Amino acid sequence: MKKIVLIILLFPLFTIAQANDCIYEVEEKTDSTSLKVLPEVLIDEKIFGNTNEYLFFSLLNTDGVPMLELQLLQKSKDFIPAKCINKTSKIILQLKNGKIVTLLATNEEACSVLNYDEKEKNNIRVLTGYFFFGITNYDELKNSQITLMRIQFAGDSKEYVIKNELVSETLNTKSNPDRIFIDYLKCIE
């Protein structure tokens, strides 16, 4: 009986704690538009020789449409070839439960922009792209972790093994890339 009373008394605290899980980097609403953007999450980090590559995801909702922002940051002393996203690009996710979920690129075409860091003598490329969630298997993302991912760029594709926990060597951050949709999709619905 004491356990039941304790659960009943603590239930409102759990509800409040769950509601506060959604911390937005941007949250704006006007009469005609709305925008909610969650902070970016490090999904993958590769450091090999002179080359560093970071893949970030950020979930957002613009005017009621949930979307995924992808940002690929590459840094190298060597030349970095451009990567592009176009309307045929996709992100294909394999979930732990065996299901496949595909996110489709928006119609915006984007290629990585080349910058040069004079101080560190590095070439830096940044690619930003946006993807829509498909109607089919959308709910699967809320219930199952990601195990594998393929990004189909314009002209090539790259596969990623998604980790349970990612401790960044250079950014000094910790993330759970396999749970990004389980933990945060509720924040942009």
Image: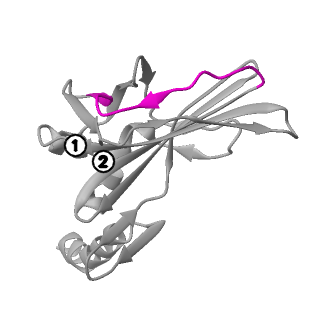
Task: Determine which residue is flagged by label 2.
Answer: 182
Q: Is residue 173 visible?
A: yes
Nearer-the-camera pick, 31 or 72: 31
Q: Which residue is mark 1?
A: 143
Compute the Cα span from label 1 to label 2.
Answer: 6 Å
- Crowd tier of the residue under label 2, counting other residues whose Cα lies within 10 Å: few below 14, some 14–19, many 20 or above: some
Q: Is residue 10 above or below residue 18?
A: below
User: In the image, 95: left or right of 83?
Assistant: left
Give the SS element for disc 2: helix
Image quadrant where residue 178 sits: top left
Is 85 a magenta residue?
yes
Instruction: Give the image location of residue 149, x and y in percent.
Output: 36, 26
Q: Give the magenta part as a residue range.
A: 77-94
In the image, taking residue 5 as reference, residue 121 lies left or right, namely right
Residue 60's image quarter?
Answer: bottom left
Sequence-wise first label, 1 or 2: 1
Do the residues under discs 1 and 2 have CB atoms within 8 angstroms? yes
